Amino acid sequence: MTEAERRAMRGLVATLLGNPTPFAAADLPLDLVRRHLLAPLAYKAGVAALRNDYIASSLQAERRAVVLSEALDALGSAGTPVILLKGIAYAGSIYADPAERPMSDIDLLVRSPDMPVAERALTRLGYWRAGSAAQSSVTRHAITLKRRDGSIDLHRHVLHAGRSRIDIAAIWRDAEPSHIAGARRPAPVHEYILHAAHIGRHEGLVPLVNYVDAARLEPDASDRALATLSSQWRVSRAVDAVGVARRDLGDGGGERGHLLSFPSSDEILAGALPPRWLQISRKLRMIDDSLGVIGLAVATVRGRVASRKIRS
């Protein structure tokens, strides 16, 4: 990325994070904007060159709504309650125009005991399991189901079992009606924490639209209440790191390095993966305590064992 491209990207991202910052649209690296799932938002921010991307996203959003409705009908008929997670919960809510929030799949949370019933209901719609064999382990947080016109990540949790102490029962208890019939969404403070935990699970290197999500999701709860709950759930490092990254990205030019614990804002902008040793360092530093590290290790081993059993 050239210096002019970097400045343009920083200005666009700062603007989308709520800090209007001049940027030269002609200098934007459009392929990078697309990789960060920002093309529709950039078009709305005045980047005319991305008009076709916005139109395509609008058509995809319309089709996605049909696919989601069909899936929710099937799950409802099977008696399986559903909570919307991530992009599918945001399109049409914190993004009034669903086209502004592209996504690669639909994320749905069901109760862990309901996973087999939910998978069978979706299989009857033509979905097949497409993820790795390790997803068969109950320690894994989700399974991936695909068909020609859609992809669904069916979640029992947001993180691997044991990695955190996220209170999944509280998430179900406090879930609120969503803008989509047949599904709920997490309470605002829960939704923000889950979103930050998702970013932390990927060591911060997620498409930049995720940081725009975080800015729009920020709950009305006090900083102390947010800190207390994220600490109780053992995801405070991720929540804190996402807050720092948002500030770095949102000021349009500031840079504070986090080398061993979290990527710098320039790294997030570039979107390139670091060396494997640094990924592992950051993954471990995003876990709040030693029990979480042990939990992640156990989940990883059990996933590999499940994978070997299936292959054999």
Image (cartoon, grey):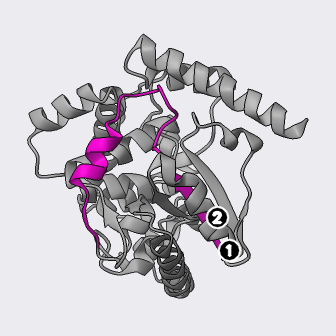
Please tell me how crowded label 1 is: few (under 14), some (14-19), or many (20+) other residues with Cα within 10 Å: few
The residue to which callout 2 is attached is 120
Q: Is residue 116 left or right of residue 255?
A: right
Q: Is residue 278 left or right of residue 217?
A: right
Which type of secondary structure does the marked residue at label 1 adopt?
loop
Closer-to-camera residue (231/18)? 231
Residue at coordinates 50% horizontally, 87% vertically from top-left? 62
The residue to which callout 1 is attached is 124
Which type of secondary structure does the marked residue at label 2 adopt?
helix
Magenta span of residues: 150-178
Q: Is residue 248 visible?
A: no
Residue at coordinates 32% horizontally, 65% vertically from top-left? 184
Give the amino acid type for the residue marked by disc 2 in the picture.
Answer: Arg
- Percent position (x, y) of residue 95? 32, 72
On screen, 240 above or below 125?
above
On screen, 143 above or below 274?
below
Q: Is residue 225 visible?
A: yes
- Percent position (x, y) of residue 155? 51, 51
| Magenta span contains residue 258 | no
Estimate the spatial distance between the alpha carbons at disc 1 and disc 2, rounded to whole Å: 6 Å
- Percent position (x, y) of residue 17? 29, 57
Give the amino acid type for the residue marked by disc 1 in the picture.
Answer: Arg
Closer-to-camera residue (22/170)? 170
On screen, 221 above or below 128?
above
| Magenta span contains residue 169 | yes
Residue at coordinates 62% horizontally, 51% vertically from top-left? 143
- Percent position (x, y) of residue 212? 35, 57
